[in-house]
Image (spheres, grey):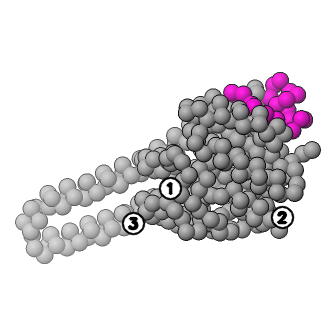
Amino acid sequence: MKPSVSIVIPVYNEIDNLPELVRRVVAVGRSLGRPWELVLVDDGSRDGTTEALGQLAGAHPGEVKSLILNRNYGQHNAILCGFSFARGEILVTLDADLQNPPEEIPRLVEAIDAGNDVVGTVRADRQDTLFRRWPSLFINHLVRATTGVMMHDYGCMLRAYRRRVVEAMLSCRERSTFIPVLANMFAKRTAEIEVRHAERAAGESKYSFVKLINLQFDLLTCMTTTPLRLLSYFGGCIAALAVLFGAALLLLRFAFGAHWAGDGTFTLFAVLFFFTGAQFVAMGLLGEYIGRIHADVRERPRYIVDHIVGETLPDHPATNDPSAHRRAMIPAPHHEVCP
């Protein structure tokens, strides 16, 4: 029987959390009162998670399926991999660290049943450190300002999507993507609900300070051209100020003579350094965009599935079609989308 709800969880070095995670998610899935499946995506783990996923899939036949990627491709690509192998009409994503309780999943499913295409969540009484919360507030505000998508907590991956939105995301060909923003671009109706938040049950966060910065660069440059537009505004302001500054220098030159500012030498150096800095900012932003264009033109696969353990659907192409693994290695075909 085709599942109605697919729960997709990317997993990376979460050996300590896995048994409790699967136990709680399975309990929630069985309580939904409808066909369901759990799709676990191992994103190149190296701590024994891969072997544990195989055992868990074997222990829950027909309910749990594990997709094993051959290396680490990143959280969002792992989720897209899970989407491509999930079959539910409602797809729910969840992190493996148990900071967002799986017991909140039925509330997201109810919100989708109410007619929403995408349901986001806001972490109530967030248990992260100030180091994680303050930058998150800034980034959430920046995303809303640059994309126009008015949601308040883009860092929480406990979210639900309708199948047609997921299919639209899978048809996109870009390699760098940010799923919550991309999904909202295809959604007619969206909603947000508050969910509980707990401290990490075990292990450490996989997002270091450097990875968080890289994630924000990916977000800004792959989802919006606003930085380029701001750069144009910034350049126009600099040009206007330069004209005013030049006029002021000319007037002061006639009023006080050349000696008042070292015959203008230091002033010229200051202007030169300012414009040089602005050029470097522009080159950096343009480089980010050109790098992503280069990556998209190459059309490399988002991920490669090494093997699959367990099967929730007997008619899944991975079981009956020997070319399924080969298809997983190539980009999804492009679909025409009406503007």
Residue position for label 2: 113
CA gap between label 3 and label 2 equals: 49 Å
Question: Residue at 82% across / 37% down in the picture?
Answer: 61
Looking at the rendered image, the disc whose residue lies closer to the viewer, 1 or 3, is: 1
Residue type indicated by callout 1 = Leu
Which part of the image, by quadrant, shows the C terminus?
bottom right
Residue type indicated by callout 2 = Asp
Question: Residue at 53% across / 58% down in the picture?
Answer: 199
Residue position for label 1: 228
Residue type indicated by callout 3 = Cys
Residue position for label 3: 237
Question: For residue 320: magenta?
Answer: yes
Marks 1 and 3 close (CB-CB < 8 Å): no
- For the record, the magenta segment spans 305-324
- Residue at disc 3, secondary structure: helix
Question: Residue at 70% across / 41% down in the picture?
Answer: 40
Q: Quadrant of residue 239?
A: bottom left
Looking at the rendered image, the disc whose residue lies closer to the viewer, 1 or 2, is: 2
- Residue at disc 2, secondary structure: helix
N-terminal label among 1 and 2:
2
Which class describes the residues within 10 Å of circle 1: few (<14), some (14-19), or many (20+)? some
